[in-house]
C-alpha cells in the first residue's frame, strides 16, 4: 500500500458514505440501507470532500506537466475539402515498440494520481458552475439514481430485505432534500428546462409500480407488512414530489432547451475527458453518418438485391427467423448469445478471467432502456445486461440484437468493466469509477461492435445491417443532434434536410425518424429529451470509438508486422478508465 492507495481508499469510503446511490452503482457495499442527499447540504459536503481530497493528493503526488498527446477532434477541419490544410496529427514512427501501459509502480502511481486529480478538478468545476443543483434530467438525474439504488438491491433469493426496507423508508426524506435544493436554485435564477421537469414528473408516476413489483417478490415473510407500508409511504412522497414539479417548478421553468457552448464544453470535459472543436465535430458527425448509411445500403443489397433499405428492414422485421415470442424466451435467447460470445472469444481473441465468464441477462420491471451494470466490488453481484421489453407477451425482433449484445456484453462493457474491477494493479478509485467515464466506456462498447465485424462474427448480413443500423447510424446521428441542438447550429447545405435552418427539438424528432430506423414515437421523443438534459453524453459513443480506433492504428503503425491485436487490447484495458485525452496520451506513449 502506497500513500496514494491509502488516500484513495479513504476517499472512496467517504464518498460512499456521502453518496450511497453512487456507491450502489459502483458496487461498494456498506451503504445499502441509505440514499444520497441531493439537497444543498449533500452537494456542499461532496464538494468539500473533493476539495479536501485534492489538497491531500497534491501533497502526496504533486501534479506533473500535462501529458503531451493530440486532443480528440471530430474529423476534418471545416474548409479542408477546399484546399485548406487540416491540423496535423503526429505520425508514429514505423517499427517502434508497441504502445505501453504502466510497467513500474512509479508509472502506475503517476497515471493513478493524474486520473484522480482530473476527476476531482472536474467535479469541483461542475459544482462551481452550479450544474449539480439543477441536475434534473431524463437519463441519470437524482430521481433516476434514487430508483436505481433500490432496484439494485433486487438479487432474487439473495435480496437483503432489510436494506430494501431501509432505502424505501429513506426515499421520502431524499425527495424533501431534493425539493429544498431545487427551490433554492430556482430562487437564485437557476432552473432546468420545462421538458426535463415533465420527464421527471413521469418518472415519479412510474416508480411506485416498480417498487411494488420488487417488494412483491418478498412473499409472505416477516417484513411483508413493513415493506408494504414503506412502499405506500414512498409512493405518496413521489406523488407529492410530482405535484411540486408540475405545480411549482414547471411554471417558472424556461421553454428553451439549448444550454449553449460553455455548458456543452463543461459536459465534454466531464463525460469525455477531452476538449473538442465543437463545430468541427459537428461536421464530422455528418460525414460519419453518410459513410455509415452507404455501408447500410451495401448490406441491404446483399439481403434483398434491388430493394430500397426500408423494404429490406420491413422484410427482416417480418421474417420469422428474426422474431422471438415473449420476454422470457427473448431473455433466454440473449443469455445464450452472451454465453456463446464468451466461449468463442475466450483464449482466442481475449483471455477472459473466470469470474467474467458469467453474465446475467435480465428484463427490468419498468421501461429503462438497454444497459449494462458491472459486477459489484466483492463480485457478489454479477455483471448484468438489462434489456427493456415493452410488452412481455409481444414478438421481439432480433436482427439488430447481436451488435447491441456485443456492445453490452463481451467484448464490450462486461469484459472492459469486469477486467477493470479485477485488476489489482489499479487502485480502488480506478477499479470502480468506469461509470464516470462514458467516453472511455461507451467508446469501447461501440468499438466492440465494429471489432466483432472485423473478427468475422456478422456472417449473416442481417446482423451486419443490424449493427450498422442499431449502433453506428444512431450514434452518428446523435453527434449531429446533440451538438446541433445545444449550440443551435445551422444545418449545412448539401444535406438534403432543412438546409440553413437552425436545430430545434422538432427538427431533431424529424431527423431521428429518418436516420434511426422505424421506432415507436415514444422512443424517438425520449432520445431527444435525453440529449437535451445531459449535454455531451450522446456524443461519447462515436467520439470515444474514434479515439480507440486512432490509438489502435497508431500502435499498429509503430509495431509494424509485430503488432498483436490481442496484446494491444490487453494492455489498453489494463490502463483502466480515464478521460479520452489521457487515454490517447498513454496509448501513444513511446
Image (cartoon, helix red, strand yellow):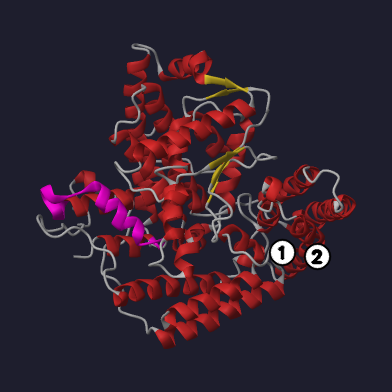
User: Residue at position x 71%, y 54% from top?
Assistant: 150
* Secondary-structure class at tag 1: loop
Most extreme residue toward the left is 95
Residue holding disc 2: 173
Residue holding disc 1: 35
Q: Is residue 557 left or right of residue 159?
A: left
Q: Decide which of 584, 324 is in the foreground and name it.
A: 324
User: Residue at position x 88%, y 55% from top?
Assistant: 226
Considering the whole magenta stretch, tell me its main secondary structure: helix
Magenta run includes residue 477 = no
Q: Residues within 10 Å of mark 2 (few under 14, many from 20)?
A: some
Q: Are marks 2 and 1 in contact (CB under 8 Å)?
A: yes
Quadrant in the rendering for residue 285: top left
Q: Quadrant of the N terminus?
A: bottom left
> For the residues carrying marks 2 and 1, which lies nearer the camera in this image?
1
Cα–Cα gap, marks 2 and 1: 9 Å
The image shows residue 99 at horizontal and vertical percentages of 22, 59
The image shows residue 573 at horizontal and vertical percentages of 35, 56
> Which sits earlier in the primary sequence, circle 2 or circle 1?
1
* Secondary-structure class at tag 2: helix
Magenta run includes residue 559 = yes
Q: Which residues are magenta?
A: 557-579
Amino acid at each position: 500500500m502506497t500513500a496514494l492507495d491509502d488516500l484513495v481508499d479513504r476517499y472512496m469510503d467517504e464518498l460512499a458514505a456521502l453518496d450511497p446511490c453512487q456507491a450502489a452503482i459502483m458496487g461498494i457495499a456498506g451503504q445499502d440501507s441509505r440514499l444520497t442527499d441531493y439537497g444543498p447540504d449533500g452537494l456542499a459536503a461532496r464538494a468539500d470532500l473533493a476539495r479536501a481530497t485534492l489538497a491531500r493528493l497534491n501533497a502526496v503526488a504533486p501534479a506533473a506537466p500535462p501529458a503531451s498527446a493530440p486532443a480528440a477532434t471530430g474529423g476534418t477541419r471545416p474548409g479542408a475539402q477546399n484546399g485548406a490544410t487540416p491540423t496535423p496529427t503526429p505520425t508514429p514512427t514505423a517499427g517502434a515498440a508497441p504502445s505501453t501501459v504502466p510497467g513500474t509502480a512509479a508509472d502506475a502511481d503517476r497515471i493513478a494520481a493524474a486520473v484522480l486529480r482530473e476527476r476531482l478538478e472536474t467535479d469541483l468545476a461542475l459544482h462551481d458552475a452550479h450544474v449539480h443543483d439543477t441536475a434534473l434530467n431524463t437519463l441519470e438525474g437524482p430521481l433516476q439514481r434514487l430508483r436505481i439504488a433500490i432496484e439494485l438491491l433486487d438479487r432474487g433469493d439473495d435480496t437483503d430485505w432489510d436494506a430494501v426496507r431501509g432505502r424505501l423508508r429513506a426515499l421520502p426524506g431524499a425527495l424533501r432534500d431534493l425539493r429544498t435544493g431545487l427551490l433554492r436554485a430556482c430562487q437564485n435564477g437557476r432552473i432546468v428546462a420545462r421538458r426535463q421537469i415533465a420527464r421527471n414528473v413521469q418518472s415519479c408516476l412510474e416508480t411506485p409500480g416498480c417498487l411494488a413489483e420488487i417488494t412483491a417478490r418478498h412473499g409472505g415473510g416477516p417484513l411483508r407488512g413493513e415493506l408494504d407500508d414503506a412502499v405506500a409511504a414512498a409512493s405518496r412522497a413521489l406523488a407529492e414530489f410530482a405535484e411540486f414539479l408540475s405545480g411549482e417548478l414547471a411554471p417558472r421553468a424556461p421553454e428553451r432547451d439549448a444550454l449553449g457552448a460553455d455548458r456543452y464544453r463543461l459536459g465534454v470535459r466531464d463525460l469525455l475527458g477531452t476538449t473538442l472543436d465543437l463545430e468541427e465535430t459537428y461536421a464530422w458527425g455528418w460525414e460519419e453518418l453518410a459513410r455509415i448509411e452507404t455501408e447500410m445500403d451495401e448490406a441491404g443489397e446483399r439481403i434483398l438485391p434491388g430493394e430500397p433499405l426500408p423494404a429490406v428492414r420491413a422484410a427482416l422485421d417480418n421474417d420469422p427467423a428474426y422474431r422471438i415470442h415473449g420476454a422470457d424466451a427473448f431473455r433466454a435467447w440473449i443469455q445464450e448469445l452472451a454465453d456463446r460470445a464468451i466461449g468463442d472469444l475466450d483464449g482466442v481473441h481475449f483471455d477472459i478471467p473466470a469470474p467474467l465468464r458469467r453474465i446475467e441477462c435480465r428484463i427490468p420491471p419498468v421501461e429503462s432502456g438497454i444497459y449494462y451494470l458491472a459486477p459489484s466490488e466483492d463480485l457478489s453481484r454479477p455483471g448484468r445486461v438489462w434489456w427493456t421489453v415493452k410488452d412481455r407477451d409481444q414478438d421481439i425482433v432480433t436482427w439488430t440484437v447481436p451488435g447491441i449484445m456485443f456492445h453490452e456484453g463481451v467484448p464490450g462493457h462486461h469484459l472492459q468493466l469486469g477486467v477493470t474491477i479485477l485488476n489489482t494493479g489499479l487502485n480502488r478509485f480506478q477499479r470502480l469509477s468506469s461509470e464516470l467515464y462514458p467516453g472511455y466506456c461507451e467508446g469501447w462498447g461501440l468499438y466492440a461492435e465494429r471489432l466483432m465485424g472485423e473478427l468475422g462474427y456478422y456472417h449473416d448480413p442481417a446482423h451486419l445491417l443490424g449493427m450498422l443500423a442499431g449502433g453506428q447510424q444512431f450514434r452518428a446521428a446523435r453527434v449531429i443532434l446533440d451538438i446541433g441542438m445545444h449550440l443551435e447550429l445551422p444545418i449545412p447545405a448539401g444535406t438534403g434536410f432543412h438546409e440553413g435552418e437552425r436545430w430545434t427539438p422538432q427538427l431533431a424528432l424529424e431527423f431521428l425518424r429518418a436516420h434511426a430506423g422505424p421506432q415507436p414515437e415514444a422512443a424517438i421523443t425520449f432520445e431527444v429529451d435525453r440529449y437535451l438534459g445531459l449535454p455531451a453524453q450522446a456524443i461519447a459513443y462515436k467520439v470515444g470509438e474514434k479515439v480507440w480506433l486512432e490509438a489502435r492504428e497508431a500502435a499498429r503503425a509503430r509495431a509494424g508486422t509485430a503488432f498483436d491485436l490481442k496484446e494491444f487490447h490487453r494492455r489498453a484495458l489494463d490502463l483502466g478508465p480515464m478521460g479520452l485525452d489521457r487515454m490517447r496520451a498513454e496509448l501513444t506513449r513511446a
